[in-house]
Amino acid sequence: MQEEQKMPAPDAAKNTGALWAVGLSFVVIIILAVLLFVIPSPAKNTTDTATTTEEVVGDTATPVKPTSTETASYPAAGSRLMQNGVYVTVIHFTGKAFNPASVTITHGEEVRFINTSNLTMDIGPQQPNASSPSYSALNQASAKGKGGIYQVGLTDIGVWAYANLTSNPPIKGIVNVK
């Protein structure tokens, strides 16, 4: 008697092919998930300050971009940056004004003045009004030309006025430290 060779049923062959397709799809999905979520993406360009600065309105912070008069090499005027664990608010000296002319920060935070003008910047304390004292911490050691930076931490709560002492009349601004 001859033995009959058994061939798999056509349905079994279809099921085996379907199982391979499902298994292969599963492996591809796992590989894509690892590539997208586990392997870190390349570091962002840290020179793009427009994406790393924030404008603070009330207690919320939103990203801001430089205006057309500001160059990308400076953080945006009025932006609030985290630097070495301390918030720093940026003020531009434009030669005609401080931008923004008034900022509010929390005590212990810092203010960074950047000279974006062709004039000399020399920050000095002013009396905000006749009954208020000036804040001696707002006293730049030496005048700075275009691109010059003066950064200072403010710890005393109050409304503090400052001016660019090299302009005539002095261009003024206010830092409200809460």
Image: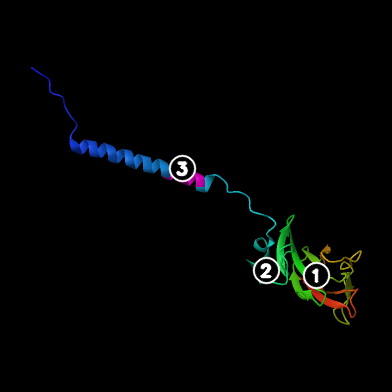
Check the image and name the residue furthest to the bottom.
130
Q: Position of residue 52 (x, y in %)?
A: 67, 60
Does dot 1 land on a helix, a strand or a loop?
loop
Is 71 positioned to the left or the right of 168 in the image? left
Give the residue number, with chain letter if any, for mark 1: 157
Describe the element under mark 3 as helix, strand or loop.
helix
Tell me if residue 34 is in the magenta stretch.
Answer: yes
**What is the crowding at mark 2: few (fewer than 14 residues within 10 Å), some, or many (at least 20)?**
some
> Label 2 belongs to which residue?
55
Instruction: Name which of mark 3 and mark 1 comes first in the sequence.
Output: 3
Look at 65% across and 62% down and name the residue there: 51
Query: Which quadrant of the structure image shows residue 155?
Result: bottom right
Q: Residues within 10 Å of mark 3 (few under 14, many from 20)?
A: few
Label 2, secondary structure: give it.
strand
Determine the CA span between mark 3 and mark 1. Answer: 55 Å
Quarter holding the C terminus?
Answer: bottom right
Question: Which callout, 1 or 2, points at the residue further toward the start of the chain?
Answer: 2
Q: Mark 3 touching mark 1, by CB under 8 A?
A: no
Task: Please indicate whether residue 145 sits to the left or right of residue 19 in the image.
Answer: right
- Which residue does the numbered mark 3 point to in the structure image? 31
Say above or below: 78 vs 16.
below
Q: Report the magenta stretch's main SS.
A: helix
Q: Residue 88 in the image: state x and y as whole percent.
A: 75, 63
**Whole-percent x and y of residue 86?**
74, 59
The boundaries of the magenta stretch are 29-35
Query: Could you tell me the amino acid type at mark 1?
Result: Ile
Above or below residue 76? Residue 83 is above
Asked if residue 99 lies in the magenta stretch, the reply is no
